[in-house]
């Protein structure tokens, strides 16, 4: 097999595009016009990562590979819409921990249900062993880049 002619990157890009469209569509259907898809993903990130650690603006910038100004604008809008609160931390008053409000916690339930429905569709025809192998291969590819 000629590895140079496999075009794995193109195949990965195609499946990424399909998955992204499906997840975006499911999330939009779940949340309606109440917030943007980007805000929904930020809520999901804060909800999931916030279980084990404090979340700050820099974490969102890093996770979504966004500029500070873009994240700041998004968080300002989310705060105005009562989706997040920014709370000073005792060690450094300049740092503001980002916390979800009750409103966004309820929305997150809809977001996670939408995401998991697409995720479940992705793996429904795969065995646990195939999933394990796939994740291992993806890790190897990511590490080689």
Image (tube, helix red, strand yellow):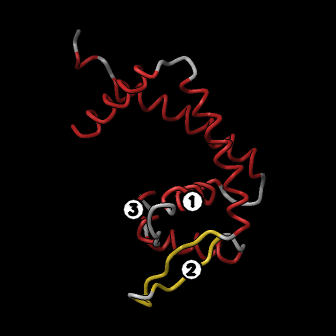
The spot of residue 129 in percent (x, y) is 40, 20
Depth check, front residue: 34 or 59: 59
Label 1, label 3: how far apart the Cα atoms are = 16 Å
Read off the residue under disc 3: 62
Label 1, label 2: how far apart the Cα atoms are = 14 Å
The spot of residue 37 in percent (x, y) is 64, 53
**Nearest to N terminus: mark 1 or mark 2:** 1
Label 2, label 3: how far apart the Cα atoms are = 18 Å
**Nearest to N terminus: mark 2 or mark 3:** 3
Please tell me which residue is depicted at 22% across the width and 12% down the height of the picture.
Answer: 2
Mark number, residue 86: 2
Task: Give the left or right position of residue 111, taking residue 65 as reference.
Answer: right
Are there few (<14), some (14-19), or many (20+) residues within 10 Å of tag 2?
Answer: some
1 or 3: mark nearer the eye:
1
Q: What element carries label 2?
A: strand
Q: Quadrant of residue 114?
A: top right
Mark number, residue 47: 1
Mark number, residue 104: none
């Amino acid at each position: 097999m000629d590895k140079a002619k496999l075009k794995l990157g193109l195949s990965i890009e195609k499946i990424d595009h399909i998955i992204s469209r499906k997840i975006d569509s499911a999330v939009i259907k779940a949340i309606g016009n109440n917030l943007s898809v980007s805000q929904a993903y930020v809520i999901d990130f804060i909800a999931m990562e916030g279980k084990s650690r404090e979340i700050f603006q820099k974490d969102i910038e890093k996770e979504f590979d966004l500029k500070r100004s873009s994240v700041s604008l998004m968080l300002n809008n989310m705060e105005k819409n009562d989706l997040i609160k920014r709370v000073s931390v005792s060690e450094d008053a300049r740092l503001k921990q980002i916390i979800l409000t009750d409103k966004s916690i309820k929305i997150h339930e809809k977001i996670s249900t939408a995401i998991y429905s697409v995720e479940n569709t992705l793996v429904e025809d795969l065995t646990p062993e195939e999933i394990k192998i796939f994740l291992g291969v993806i890790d190897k590819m990511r590490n080689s880049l």
